[in-house]
Amino acid sequence: MANSFLDRFKQGLSRTRDILNADVGDLLRGRRPLEPADLDAIEEALLAADMGVPAVAEAMEVLRARSREVWTEGRDAMRGLLRQELLRQLEQPAPAARTAARPWVVFLVGVNGVGKTTTIGKLARAERAAGRTALLVAADTFRAAAAEQLQVWAERTGAAFHRGAEGADPSAVLTDGLRAARSRGHDTVLVDTAGRLHTKGNLMAELAKMSRVAAREVPDAPHETLLVLDATLGGNALAQAREFAKAGGVTGLVLTKLDGTAKGGVAVAVVRELGVPIRHVGLGEAAEDLVPFDASSFVDALVGE
Ligand SMILES: Nc1nc2c(ncn2[C@@H]2O[C@H](COP(=O)(O)OP(=O)(O)O)[C@@H](O)[C@H]2O)c(=O)[nH]1
Ligand SMILES: [Mg+2]
């Protein structure tokens, strides 16, 4: 099981890992004490993988401090040190475990195109596989096509579906959806939110309002708010993350499109920046291409051989 995650991460992160292995693999293998120029090369490779300046600076401080001695500890000692550093930066307290709350309400937020709707489809599949019923709520009312796309996922995964009219107030659609979930006894409600609004109204204010509305219908809802970030955007995903974090309430991250990007290091940057854990990683467009995040396998896939 653990190995299959590692394999999938490895596959997904192969382009990011290639940067590190091609440019500095020999240095990390540590057959000699590293010179300042070697350390600069390692730093550059980490930045090229989009780990972000603060995370890289912190890791390099440790590598620089120990580079003169650690290589004598044998093959891969430098790599081990880097691995430890990245793991330390990626590890976050685990989110509160799922309670008996029913329905369990999850919001997915993020800008257009990052993969919110697709991720809901993948999560719906996982809910169904776990033997739970799920209702997908199309609160992205900006485009009719958005609701239709979600409906396709509902049909594909055997989940129930709720939508409002195009251009309807997202909070009103949400209220109706949650009432339907309660009366039909659904286990889980997955809420697809808009990355843009019809009105010039502020998206963050709208999302905050939706949270209040949810709490009125279901105690303590939303139980999770997952911010979806597109790994291919690298550092730009970080800027988006900051905006959404300001709106508050983000309990976890989903990092999509890790397959095929060389910017997988952005995982370290966003966790460090927001202080919330990555919950899932998207490794493709199909329903089964969502993997629970595991920091240790992820770091192995990133800096392993
Ligand atoms: N390669 C890849 N594509 C993805 C992934 N997640 C989503 N996509 C694609 O990204 C595009 C936008 O996804 P969508 O769910 O519509 O984004 P939304 O606007 O945030 O709802 C679609 O073409 C998806 O198939 C992923 O993990 N890997
Ligand atoms: Mg969408």
Image: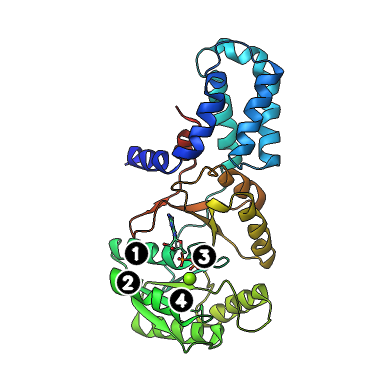
Q: Residue at x 37, y 85 (%)?
A: 183
Query: Do the residues under discs 1 and 2 have CB atoms within 8 angstroms?
Result: yes
On whether ligand 1 comes within 8 Å of the CB at mark 3, the answer is: yes
Q: Earlier in the sequence, mark 3 or mark 4?
A: 3
In the rendered structure, which amino acid carries the disc numbered 2?
Thr
In this view, the mark in front (3 or 2): 3
Q: Which residue is mark 2?
A: 133
Q: Secondary structure at mark 2?
A: loop
In the rendered structure, which amino acid carries the disc numbered 1?
Glu
Instruction: Kindly indicate the quadrant of the structure image that contains residue 69.
Output: top right
Q: Which residue is mark 4?
A: 146
Q: Position of residue 274 (x, y in %)?
A: 64, 53
Q: Which residue is mark 1?
A: 127
In this view, the mark in front (3 or 1): 3
Spatial CA span between label 3 and label 1: 23 Å
Dot 3 alpha-carbon crowd within 10 angstroms: few under 14, some 14 to 19, many 20 or more: few
